[in-house]
């Protein structure tokens, strides 16, 4: 049956099925670095055959969904290279510092060194230069299990039982089989930009990022962040919940109550550890600064930290940085000429700094309060703090010294909070830390702000740009990093997020993102949240928090 394909303003008629690779050539676009395409707004790999009227948009690594495919293909090639060089060595990928993928060697007797790096780089380069086709084979789950067993992919077998589909799309290249839970590039030659470096105890892989215009960002080491990720992975491994299958197994065999309490106990322990650090230096600490990216749980954390300090005889005062916003017409403009509310210049930093200095000096201060309906500040409470009353400030710029330049660093205790998940679908497929926060925000914005998912998705790129510009650089100067991730949370979030994602129309520009998030959530078992404590950070996103009116 005849059909028409539209690419941009051009159209072509076809009589028989035509692959996207061929359509790309037909339209003279085959040398433009495309990784994938949207076909009627569905992300497809370039081997996909079109057989119906379709609007096609070819994607490069400047597009977020194509970047994800590029990264998955690169992981596939690196895993293939390891298999070729060290067939008995198992590796595990994870997301790590400087927007990189880390490679962990799972054999305690094998050490990552320069010689291994040289061999790995040579093999990856060989595979890419050979431009080997990557084929997709559809097999029943039972057949996939046999293949996994033969290949020693026990981690993939464990997750297979939770797969809702009856088939698996295996990826095959030059005899190497793997499954990456993602579309892949048509052949290895599409991966032209990457860097592999030694980063003890393993390796780091850099790749192009869409937020950097399809370029590899400059490497910036972040030892504090890296240490937090390692601690998160070590704890998850010890607790036996470092993969989705193990999380599901915990729910099936030990139940929600025990699982929730194990995770919450870790948060309690970190709060106690943090409280002790502040108590030990309380004679000098006047400001406790709490910052982190969007949907980290900052508000609930600040409330719980206050309770922890009260239990130690320390009486903290909370002050909101949001009350120091300038009027919208006074905010700096972003590159699109719109008010940049993520910028520190959107705050009256001079007033904030002076208010904090006066309070620390024991003076009485009338604080401002930002009236969001009026869009400006109005007079707020009058406050005087005593020597035993440290001030907790919370906000995205709380760790930025430009906010409080007149206060000595010795008088500030800086806490960075963020969910640092180190959970994998299997050894070769890590879960995204950013997607976790996006799901949190999606659920919270709908539940408490009546914001539809499309609105949250539309805001997300600007939120992320602000995080890279203003927040992540401050993490390395923090005195404590609080990992707000709760390993049970995606099992809880599943029932809240999936209905919202399913409502997104297939014609929506955000459907590809929604589809990708649904692919991740579908592997988790549903978990009732009735046993989630009222003071849990989870309650900030799903409701029922005892701090809702605080």
Image (cartoon, rainbow, N blue to C red):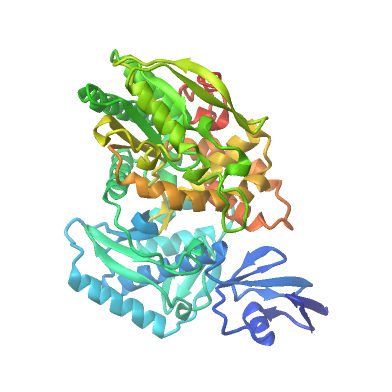
x then y, percent, for residue 525: 52, 40
Residue at image x 35%, y 61%? 152
Kindly tell me whether residue 153 is visible in this rendering: no
Quadrant of the image containing the N terminus:
bottom right
Q: Position of residue 537 (x, y in %)?
A: 46, 30
395 or 63: nearer the viewer: 395
Estimate the x, y position of residue 397 in percent, counting from the top left: 43, 40
> In this image, 260 relative to 327: left or right?
left
Of residues 253 and 113, the one drawn nearer to the viewer in this rendering? 113
Q: Is residue 125 left or right of residue 352?
A: left
Kindly identify the residue that appears in the image at 51 percent across and 60 percent down.
181
Q: In the rendered image of this protein, does residue 389 appear above or below residue 197?
A: above
Q: Residue furthest right?
A: 1
* 271 vs 11: above or below: above
Q: Residue at x 63, y 43 (%)?
A: 329
In the rendered view, tell whether residue 280 sits above or below residue 198.
Answer: above
Give percent across and percent down for residue 303: 43, 23
Depth check: give the residue in front, 450 or 337: 337
| 449 up-or-down from 54: above or below | above
Tally of numbered tags: 0
Q: Is residue 275 visible?
A: yes
């Amino acid at each position: 049956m005849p059909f028409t394909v539209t690419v941009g303003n051009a159209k072509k008629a076809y009589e028989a099925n035509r692959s996207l690779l061929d359509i790309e050539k037909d339209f003279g676009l085959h040398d433009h670095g495309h990784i994938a395409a949207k076909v009627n707004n569905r992300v497809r790999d370039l081997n996909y055959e079109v057989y119906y009227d379709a609007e096609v948009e070819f994607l490069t690594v400047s597009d977020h969904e194509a970047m994800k495919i590029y990264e998955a293909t690169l992981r596939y090639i690196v895993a293939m290279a390891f298999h070729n060089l060290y067939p008995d060595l198992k590796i595990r990928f994870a997301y790590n510092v400087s927007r990189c993928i880390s490679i962990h060697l799972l054999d305690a007797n094998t050490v990552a060194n320069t010689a291994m790096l040289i061999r790995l780089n040579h093999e990856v380069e060989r595979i890419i230069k050979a431009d080997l086709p990557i084929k997709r084979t559809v097999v029943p789950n039972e057949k996939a299990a046999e293949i996994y067993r033969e290949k020693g992919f026990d981690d993939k077998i464990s997750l297979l039982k939770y797969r809702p589909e009856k088939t698996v799309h295996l990826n095959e290249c030059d005899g190497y089989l793997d499954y990456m839970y993602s579309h892949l590039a048509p052949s290895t030659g599409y991966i032209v930009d990457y860097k592999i470096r030694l980063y003890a105890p393993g390796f780091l892989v850099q790749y192009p990022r869409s937020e950097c215009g399809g370029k590899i960002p400059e490497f910036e080491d972040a030892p504090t962040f890296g240490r937090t990720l390692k601690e998160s992975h070590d704890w998850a491994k010890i607790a036996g919940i470092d993969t989705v299958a193990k999380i599901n197994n915990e729910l099936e065999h030990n139940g929600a109550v025990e699982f929730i309490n194990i995770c919450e106990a870790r948060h309690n322990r970190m709060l106690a550890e943090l409280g002790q650090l502040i108590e030990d230096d309380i004679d000098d600490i006047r400001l406790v600064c709490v910052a982190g990216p969007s949907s980290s749980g900052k508000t609930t954390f600040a409330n719980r930290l206050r309770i922890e300090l009260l239990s130690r005889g320390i009486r903290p005062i909370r002050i909101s940085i949001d009350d120091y916003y300038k009027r919208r017409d006074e905010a700096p403009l972003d590159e699109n000429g719109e008010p940049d509310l993520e910028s520190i210049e959107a705050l009256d930093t001079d007033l904030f700094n002076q208010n904090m200095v006066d309070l620390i000096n024991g003076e009485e201060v009338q604080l401002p309060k930002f009236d969001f309906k009026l869009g400006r500040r109005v007079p707020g409470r009058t406050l005087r703090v005593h020597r035993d009353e440290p001030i907790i400030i919370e906000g995205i710029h709380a760790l930025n010294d430009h906010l409080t330049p007149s206060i000595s660093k010795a008088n500030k205790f800086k806490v960075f909070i963020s969910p640092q998940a180190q959970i994998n679908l299997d050894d070769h497929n890590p879960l995204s830390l950013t997607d976790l926060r996006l799901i949190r925000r999606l659920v919270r914005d709908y539940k408490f702000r009546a914001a539809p998912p499309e609105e949250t998705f539309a805001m997300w790129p600007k939120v992320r740009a602000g995080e890279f510009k203003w927040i992540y650089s401050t993490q390395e100067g923090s005195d404590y990093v609080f990992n707000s991730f709760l390993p049970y949370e995606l099992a809880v979030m599943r029932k809240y997020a999936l209905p919202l994602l399913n409502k997104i129309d297939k014609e929506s520009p955000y459907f590809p993102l929604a589809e990708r998030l649904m692919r991740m959530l579908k592997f988790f078992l549903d978990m009732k949240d009735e046993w989630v404590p009222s003071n849990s950070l989870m309650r900030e996103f799903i409701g029922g928090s005892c701090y809702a009116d605080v």
